[in-house]
Image: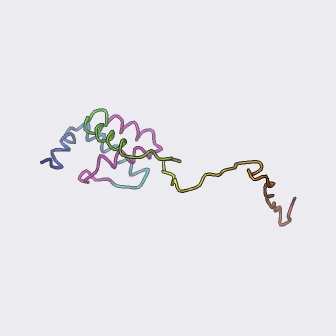
Amino acid sequence: MNTLASERGWLLDPHLLKLVHQCRRLIHSEFGVKLHLTEQHLEQQLADYAGKSRSGHLIRTWETLKAQVPQLQRDSENTEERENPKRMYRGQAIADGQPARAVEEGEPKDGTPPRKKKVIYRGQVIG
């Protein structure tokens, strides 16, 4: 039976604990979320926020931590395999239910002319 303490024995290493605290601090400053060392899925949450982050410092710190703890590499590989690839925009997943625009510019496929946009300048309709 694995307990939380036996699974997180690597947190007793002061160098690794320093990296975890640094990740937590960077996550708190960027996302406003306080992660605690006693949380059930701390490793998963650290990986999720590092994946969403725009901060290169957080990403490098997480990669350094992951490289030094083999258990974190296995866990992150397992979660990447389970997740479906998602379309991302600025670190956030895009809902796939949104229909893509069929025609960006020009005439639509059915041959009708494109709809003219009504332009208003200083309260007067132009063109």
Which residue appears farthest toward the bottom when viewing the image? 123
Main secondary structure found in the magenta portion: helix
Instruction: Please provide percent x and percent y for residue 31.
Output: 43, 53
Q: Which residues are magenta?
A: 35-64
- On the image, the x and y values in percent for residue 23 come to 35, 44
Is 113 left or right of 84, judged from the image as shown?
right
Q: Residue furthest front?
A: 110
Residue shown at 25%/53% (left/top)? 40
Instruction: Identify which residue is drawn at 48% across, 44% down.
Output: 54
Residue at the spot x=35%, y=45% of the render?
Answer: 82
Q: Quadrant of the C terminus?
A: bottom right
Q: What percent of the width, then of the height, locates residue 2?
A: 14, 47
Residue situated in front as seen by the camera: 79 or 34: 79
Corner quadrant of residue 61: top left
- Tell me if residue 118 is in the magenta stretch: no
Residue 118 spot, x, y in % from top left: 81, 61
**Residue closer to the observer: 46 or 88:** 88
Residue 61 is a magenta residue: yes
Q: Is residue 8 left or right of residue 24?
A: left
Q: How many marks?
A: 0
- Asked which colour scheme the image uses, the reply is rainbow
